[in-house]
Amino acid sequence: MSFFDARRAPAVVKHGLLRRYCQPFAYKAGSRTGGRVTFLDGYAGAGCYEDDTPGSPLVLLEAAKRVSPSRDVEAVFIEEDPATFSRLQEVLDTRCGGQKYLPLAGDVDEHLDFVLRMCHDRALFAFLDPFGPALSRHRLQDLLRRRAHENLPTDVLLHVSVRSVWNFGSRLTKAKRERRPLSRQDEAFAGRLDDFLGAGWWRSSFEEAAAAGPEEGKPAAIALRLAEQYAEEVARQTGYLAISMPVRRRPQHAPIFVLTLFTRHPDGAWLFADCVGHAGLDWEEAWRDAEASKEGANGQLGLFAPGNASIFDREDYERNHSEKWIGIIRDNIDGLLERFQPLILQRHVVEVYGATLGTGARETHVRKAVKRLHEDGLVDHDGKGRSMERAEMFRPARYDSSTLAG
Ligand SMILES: C[S@@+](CC[C@H](N)C(=O)[O-])C[C@H]1O[C@@H](n2cnc3c(N)ncnc32)[C@H](O)[C@@H]1O
């Protein structure tokens, strides 16, 4: 399998996002806990892939090393599968000597209380990245609430497996249409989804689609909506902000998972959106390179041979798309100014980015959008300055929206 295999694009996005976000998290959140930070990788895997590409444990430990002059980072890795755990230990021992880490064999659920006690005076960044349904909703909400109650900086980056929800949803709708019960295996899987998503509520979407007929609602689209609803509900019930990036293999494919960040800090949400923009470019690069590599592997003239430089020119891509991104963001902010005055961008991250979230658009494009609005006399902020996202923005006094009506 070539490095640029199509299956790698989602992993490239995941690790790029992790790499970009956890380091500033350690700086920012660690400043509130005397520099003490814990990175928890709850579904750690083997540490790196067979071709030596770093997996999440190495990505987290690389970040820990970079911040080590000013931050005391402890990393905890939990892995349930015994063979994978042995490999993880070996990878950590050979590559990460001298760093502070604790590998724990077994189920994340069993170790969680111990880990929470360990980091009772530390900022916590938890990465939960299972193959299918993850930690139960009840456990996740409890963790978020407890840490918020103790005022401890806590961010959770959760992989929500849309594919496992949609696979199950397809089987559920088929069984409903054929008026037969689910198999015992499917019932058991539904129980795991109930634990993860919260009991019951999600099933009705598939049942309604089954009743409405085959054209009504594709399971993949329903599953994506459920993942988004789940994130919104968990955020609402715990007082956190949620910001999500759907990840697909190719542009024409449905998302296979959603990466959702739960954070209480608007700085975290703002920064994450910027990281998601970079991750969007990582994804463009990864899938295009995978296509080019596949053409080469099929015996045709590939655009490049694996190992050569990427065919993707980020700057060129950005030049070709930034006008569109800025235009969309400009309109989003203009709309927000009709509803909120003062407008503080950081409080409306998802609405500010709108359809551009995860496509490559980043803070720099938001600044340009604000600058355009300022040039048009529609906002009193010029888009400059270090804390633009925290500034109170208003319509200039002479502006009256009613004069534009019609
Ligand atoms: C998607 S892989 C992790 C990949 C890794 N996070 C990375 O990015 O390199 C999921 C891992 O979680 C492990 N796992 C599954 N259920 C688990 C559980 N309940 N507790 C801990 N580990 C679990 C699996 O054995 C598998 O190695």
Image (cartoon, grey):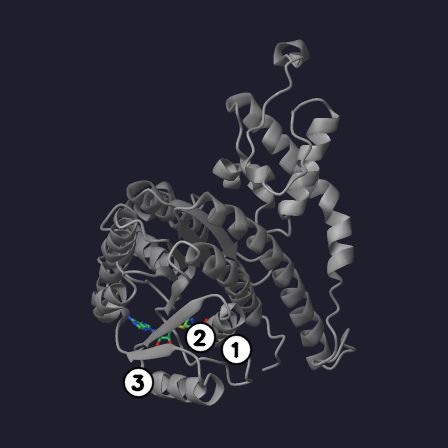
Q: Which residue in the protein does label 2 denote? A: 57
Q: Is mark 3 within 8 Å of ligand 1?
A: no
Q: Mark 1 or mark 3, which has the lower sequence index?
A: 1
- Quadrant of residue 283 within the rendered picture: bottom right
Q: Is mark 1 within 8 Å of ligand 1?
A: yes
For numbered disc 3, what is the local secondary structure? helix
Q: Which mark is residue 270?
A: none
Q: In the rendered structure, are the residues bearing label 2 and label 1 in contact, judged by CB atoms less than 8 Å apart?
A: yes
- Quadrant of residue 233 within the rendered picture: top left
What is the three-letter code of the residue carrying label 1?
Answer: Pro
**236 to the left or right of 346:** left
Q: Which residue in the protein does label 3 denote? A: 82
Q: Mark 2 or mark 3, which has the lower sequence index?
A: 2
What is the three-letter code of the residue carrying label 3?
Answer: Pro
Residue at left 34%, top 61%? 122
Q: Which of labels 2 and 3 is toward the front? A: 2
Quadrant where the N terminus is found in the figure: bottom right
Quadrant where the C terminus is found in the figure: top right
Q: Which residue in the protein does label 1 denote? A: 54
Give x and y (percent) for residue 169: 35, 55
For numbered disc 2, what is the local secondary structure? helix
The answer to whether any part of residue 349 appears in the image is yes
- Quadrant of residue 338 within the rendered picture: top right
> Would you place residue 341 above or below residue 123 in this image?
above
